[in-house]
Amino acid sequence: MRKILIFGNSGSGKSTLAKELAASEKLAHLDLDTLAWLPGIPPERAPLEVSKQRIQEFTQSYDNWAIEGCYTDLLEIVSAEATEIIFLNLTVAQCIENAKNRPWEPHKYESKAAQDENLAMLIAWIEAYPERDDVFSYRSHMRLYENFLGKKTMYTSNERIP
């Protein structure tokens, strides 16, 4: 049984790695972005209890899974069930480069143009990662990594998987 949590800054490659692992190891894949936010503009976080229920429904439906996102509060909901964690601890510069080269994410944006309109905001968000002290921050991710008692891996570059 393999139950993996993948986390890191925006643009660190969480979705890419989760999709690769899901395909190669037949894991169910959950992108926390799909349940962390309420529909509408401006974006607003869904109530924690609603997200928690949806995460628990997902984990109860599958024996093997990869859950990815930057939300430490949501990752902690299932960290006791996880068999391993992967912290994608890339530099801010690497994350920005990845964000600039990101393919269209149709589950988040109606078009590639709409996604690209959001790029300046995303880059500012990525740049603030080391200074923030919220559930999306480097500090929060490092605490999750340090406190996890199971198998844990940290990658510091895009060339992570042999």
Image (spheres, helix red, strand yellow):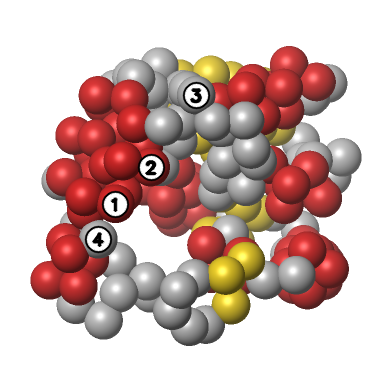
Q: Is residue 116 above or below residue 119?
A: below
The circle on residue 137 is none
Q: Residue at x 74, y 47 (%)?
A: 73
Q: Nearer the viewer, residue 60 or 131?
A: 131
SS at badge 4? loop
The circle on residue 125 is 2
Residue 155 left/right relative to 46:
left
Which kind of residue does numbered mark 2 sit on? Answer: Trp
Query: Would you say the residues marked 1 and 2 are in contact, meaning their CB atoms lie under 8 Å apart?
Result: yes
Residue 3 left/right relative to 67:
right
Q: Residue at x 42, y 50 (%)?
A: 15
Query: Would you say the residues marked 4 and 1 are in contact, meaning their CB atoms lie under 8 Å apart?
Result: yes
Q: Is residue 128 above or below residue 154?
A: below
Instruction: Name the residue carrying label 3.
Output: 131
Which kind of residue does numbered mark 3 sit on? Answer: Glu
Query: Would you say the residues marked 1 and 3 are in contact, meaning their CB atoms lie under 8 Å apart?
Result: no
Instruction: Name the residue carrying label 4.
Output: 118
Instruction: Name the residue carrying label 1.
Output: 121
Q: Nearer the viewer, residue 150 or 138?
A: 138
Instruction: Measure how far apart labels 2 and 3 are at the Cα level.
Output: 10 Å
Please tell me whether mark 4 or mark 3 is closer to you in this view. 3
SS at badge 3? loop
Which kind of residue does numbered mark 1 sit on? Answer: Met
Residue 126 left/right relative to 21:
left
